[in-house]
Amino acid sequence: MSETKKEQIIEAALKRFSHFGFQKTSMNEIADDLRITKANLYYYYADKSTLLSDCIKSVINEMTEREYEIIQAYEGGLLGTIFSLFELHVGYAKDYYMLSLYEKAEIIREISMQCMVHEFDQRNTENLRILFQRAIDAEELILHDMEIATISFHEIIKSLSMFHRISDIITGIPNIDNTDKILASQKRAAKFILEGKLISKK
């Protein structure tokens, strides 16, 4: 199946945004990469912010689909599955680090972008709930309150990511090495949080 024109534009824009950042990428450059006129590009996207929004949606959809695949493959070993999810996120963070900074968080203030981030959080939490339920059904995990457990776990893990990236977001100076710190920190936290809740089958 051939790509639609919008998919081609998103792919080209993602390459630019993830390498140079949003502010340093022009619509002219994206049009040149695609070998189309600027007018043709504006036919599909009236402005760069709308294009960025679709780029982020595309990345989020792809990542959450891959999250779900990892969760569906769970056959025991909850921590290992959680670590695989962390590694998936860090892989995307490395690929799209410039994109994830949101240019000093200025773009994130837009209502549409805030809604998108909220939806992404909800999908992450729902995927986590599915994984925890599978682990409970497999008699590997004990939880007294699924709702509190999934929300709290997600909030803690997300906060660790923000903690290690806050200086990048404030200054706008990327440091991709922070992604490795995030991964190590999240793994430590997951072990600590789930300690005493995992059932040994030895």
Image (cartoon, rainbow, N blue to C red):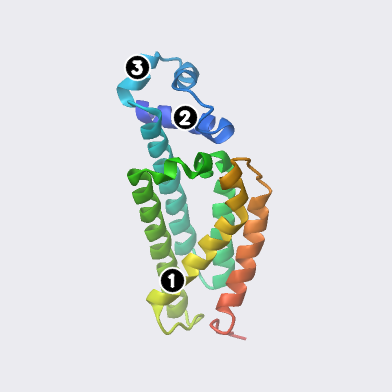
Residue 84 quadrant: bottom right
Q: Amino acid at mark 1?
A: Thr
Q: Which residue is located at x 36 percent, y 25 percent? A: 5
Q: Which residue matches tag 1?
A: 150
Residue 36 quadrant: top left
Q: Which residue matches tag 2?
A: 13
SS at mark 3?
helix
Residue sitting nearer the eye, 99 or 187: 99
Label 2 crowd bin: few (<14), some (14–19), many (20+), radius 10 Å? many
Q: Which residue is located at x 45 percent, y 15 percent? A: 35
Label 3 crowd bin: few (<14), some (14–19), many (20+), radius 10 Å? few
Residue sitting nearer the eye, 49 or 6: 49
First of labels 3, 1 by sequence position: 3
First of labels 2, 1 by sequence position: 2
- The image shows residue 40, relative to residue 7, as above or below, that is above
Q: In the displayed structure, does residue 147 sit left or right of residue 197?
A: left
Mark 2 and mark 1: Cα distance apart in space? 34 Å
Q: Which residue matches tag 3?
A: 40
Q: Which residue is located at x 48 percent, y 28 percent? A: 12
Counting from the top left corner in percent of width and height, residue 2 is at 38, 28
Residue 176 visible in the snapshot: yes
